């Protein structure tokens, strides 16, 4: 478990919230899937710790940063690192105000600035948003839709910013668990780290999986992210699938380095928890598909080797195998 100190007073009067915000349905392909989401970041100290913690558990999540926090704290490399690890990102406004209290033009301006901030770091405008405080109405939804975004709410909010006892939070989230449940936490709170570190193994032990909200992955994400890279910058990429098959573990993904525009980027991994191996090489379309037939220590961690002079390799996250996907990964070369 992750030992964290200095949490302050624990509220002895915390009670589970009576209701949650209205939720935009998400496309749950399989049963037993829940979604971890994090609002109000990034935090310069806590968000990187959270990303490493999620990797340690081999879990993906969806993040909704606030524009006023993102602009001074994270540049392109930091946001791309979040995406490289397999997470998704959405718009949570620029100033974190109650949007229903503003005029439509002001709501549009606030959301548009936040979307442009994300585009300047990722290459794409976000395809989803979460209204601050869950405060939305038809006007807010129409404005967001005009900007190309669907709303993603939540079904369970433990209000960890009130410092509730972690066992009570785990019990509450377990009772609120169902297919497609969306859990709201905040990556600016130490308490969220404690909750995540205990929640993930508890849910996994009961056979549940954590996935990203698919609505938060725009169709042009891959091409858009590649377009942001210049020679000398670190690679970008994503593991699209890690699936258990009868023959072994199938790994599909892509990685791009502007210093190797024709492909040939080396993908490395640690299969036995100790030794580094060259697992795959990207093709001319920057994709790779490999079958690992040997024993693997999970989660399986991968990274793309920087082909430039900086030699700053890019992590592609740590992953646990899931079911065989029912889609064919596009543009992959074996």
Image (cartoon, rainbow, N blue to C red):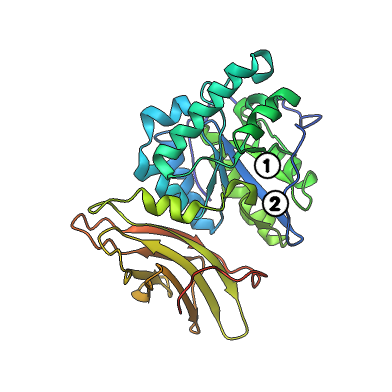
* Residue on which disc 1 sits: 183
Q: Secondary structure at mark 2?
A: strand
Q: Position of residue 327 (x, y in %)?
A: 64, 69
Q: Is residue 95 shown to the viewer in this render?
A: yes
- What residue is drawn where x is 36% and y is 70%? 268
Secondary structure state at the residue bearing disc 1: strand
Quickly name the residue at label 2: 34
Whether 182 is drawn above or below 236: the answer is above
* Residue density around tag 2, few if under 14, some if 14–19, many if 20 or more, within 10 Å: many
In percent of width and height, residue 11 lies at: 66, 25
Which image quarter: residue 137?
top right
Residue 320 is left or right of residue 259, and the answer is right
| Badge number at residue 216 | none
Give the residue at x 60% y 46%.
216
Q: Position of residue 280 (x, y in %)?
A: 39, 75
Q: CA distance from mark 2 to mark 1?
A: 8 Å
Label pair 2/1, CB-CB below 8 angstroms: yes
Residue 10 in view in this figure: no
Q: Nearer the viewer, residue 60 or 289?
A: 289
223 with respect to 132 (left or right): left
Q: x%, y% of residue 134?
A: 69, 28
Q: Residue at coordinates 49% horizontally, 39% vertically from top-left?
A: 4
């Amino acid at each position: 478990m992750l030992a964290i100190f200095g949490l302050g007073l624990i509220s002895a009067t915390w009670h589970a919230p009576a209701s949650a915000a209205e939720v935009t349905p998400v496309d749950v392909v399989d049963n037993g899937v829940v979604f971890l989401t994090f609002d109000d970041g990034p935090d310069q100290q806590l968000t990187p710790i959270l990303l490493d913690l999620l990797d340690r558990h081999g879990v993906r999540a969806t993040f909704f940063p606030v524009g006023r926090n993102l602009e001074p704290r994270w540049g392109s490399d930091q946001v791309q690192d979040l995406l490289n690890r397999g997470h998704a990102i959405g718009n949570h406004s620029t100033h974190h105000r109650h949007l229903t209290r503003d005029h439509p033009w002001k709501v549009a301006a606030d959301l548009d600035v936040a979307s442009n901030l994300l585009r300047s770091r990722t290459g794409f405008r976000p395809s989803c948003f979460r209204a601050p405080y869950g405060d939305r109405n038809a006007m807010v939804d129409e404005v967001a839709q005009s900007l190309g975004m669907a709303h993603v709410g939540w079904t369970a909010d433990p209000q960890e910013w009130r410092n509730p006892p972690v066992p009570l939070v785990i019990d509450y989230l377990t009772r609120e668990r169902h297919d497609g449940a969306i859990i709201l936490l905040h990556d600016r709170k130490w308490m969220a780290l404690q909750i995540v570190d205990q929640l993930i193994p508890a849910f996994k032990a009961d056979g549940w999986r954590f996935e990203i909200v698919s609505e938060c992955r725009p169709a042009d994400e891959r091409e858009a992210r590649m377009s942001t890279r210049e020679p000398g910058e670190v690679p970008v990429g994503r593991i699209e699938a890690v699936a258990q098959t009868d023959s072994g573990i199938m790994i599909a993904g892509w990685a791009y380095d502007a210093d190797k525009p024709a492909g040939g980027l080396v993908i490395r991994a640690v299969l036995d928890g100790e030794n580094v191996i060259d697992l795959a090489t990207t093709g001319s379309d920057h994709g790779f598909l490999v079958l690992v037939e040997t024993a693997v220590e999970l989660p399986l961690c991968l990274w793309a080797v920087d082909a430039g002079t900086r030699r700053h390799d890019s992590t592609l996250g740590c992953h646990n195998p899931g079911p065989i996907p029912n889609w064919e990964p596009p543009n992959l070369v074996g």
